[in-house]
Image: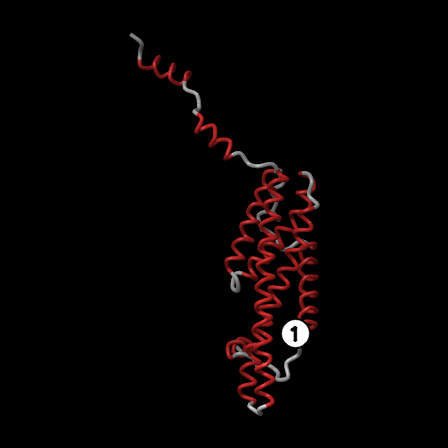
Amino acid sequence: MASLNDFAKGWAKERKPGIRERIKRAVKKEPPLRLRIVQAIHMLKVQSHRLEYMIAKLKERDQELFERVVEAQMEGDRLRAQVYANEVAEIRKVVKTLMMSQLALERVILRLETITSIGDAVAALAPVLGVVRELKSKLMGIVPEIALEISEVGEMLESLVIETGEYTAIASGGVGLTPEAKRILQEAAAIAEQKLREEFPALPVPATESTEEAKAENG
């Protein structure tokens, strides 16, 4: 009579992975580098388009409020004009951040589109990861859903760096922005500032500081 050990050995030898298990293994297998870069580019383009849509809607709201500022000013109602002017100023702060973020995303996408090999990925992803982290931080308080999507892309790209064997302090977020990442963000901020001046008319009534801002500066 076969012993229990003999039975166990025979079972272990004969047992092969079923079709379901083989499918699971195939699904779990990571896609090649280029495919994941393409996925990241697509996800970032979707978020860029969402930012563009939000900017357009805020510009419409800004125009409505601007007209109310002018109307109140013409009627001699300075208090009402001031209230609307403050609302316009707040909208423009948000628009500036969204514009800067969209411009930075466009530069990140361009950089990702140049990656064709593992060697390219290691060199290109360090500044990209820095920009992505910074954008997540800036957008979290304004549009958290977009910030989280961008963060997901960052995690995907970070995993690529780990797989190349080049997992450095930059990949883990252990150091500050790289010079290239700073340049991307600074250029995006400068262009956003210029676009804001060109596309939004100057207020006839200067906006006043909010109570919270005044307290923060004085305290």
In x, y percent, where is residue 99?
A: 63, 64
Front in this rendered view, residue 93 or 214: 93
Residue at horizontal 65%, vertical 74%?
A: 200
Please tell me how many numbered marks the rendered image carries.
1
Q: In this rendering, would 130 be left or right of 21?
A: right
**Rendered residue at 55%/77% (across/down):** 87
Q: Looking at the image, is 206 positioned above or below residue 200?
A: below
How is this picture coloured? secondary structure
In the depicted structure, whether residue 186 falls above or below residue 169: below
Q: Residue furthest top?
A: 1
Direction left: furthest residue: 1
Q: Position of residue 76 (x, y in %)?
A: 58, 92
Q: Provide residue 198's location: percent of width, then percent of height.
A: 70, 72
Which residue is under mark 1? 200
Residue extending furthest toward the bottom? 76
- 44 or 163: which is nearer to us? 44
- The residue located at (61%, 61%) in the rendering is 52
Report which quarter residue 70 is drawn in: bottom right
Query: Helix or strand or loop: what does disc 1 sit on?
Result: loop
User: Whole-percent x and y of residue 111?
Assistant: 69, 49
Answer with left or right where residue 121 lies relative to residue 28. Answer: right
Judge by depth and name the residue closer to the eye, 106 or 177.
Answer: 106
Q: Residues within 10 Å of mark 1 (few under 14, many from 20)?
A: few
Task: Give the quadrant of residue 184.
Answer: bottom right
Q: Residue at x 53, y 50 (%)?
A: 152
Q: Amino acid at mark 1?
A: Phe
Q: Quadrant of the N terminus?
A: top left
**Up-down: is 59 above or below 172?**
below
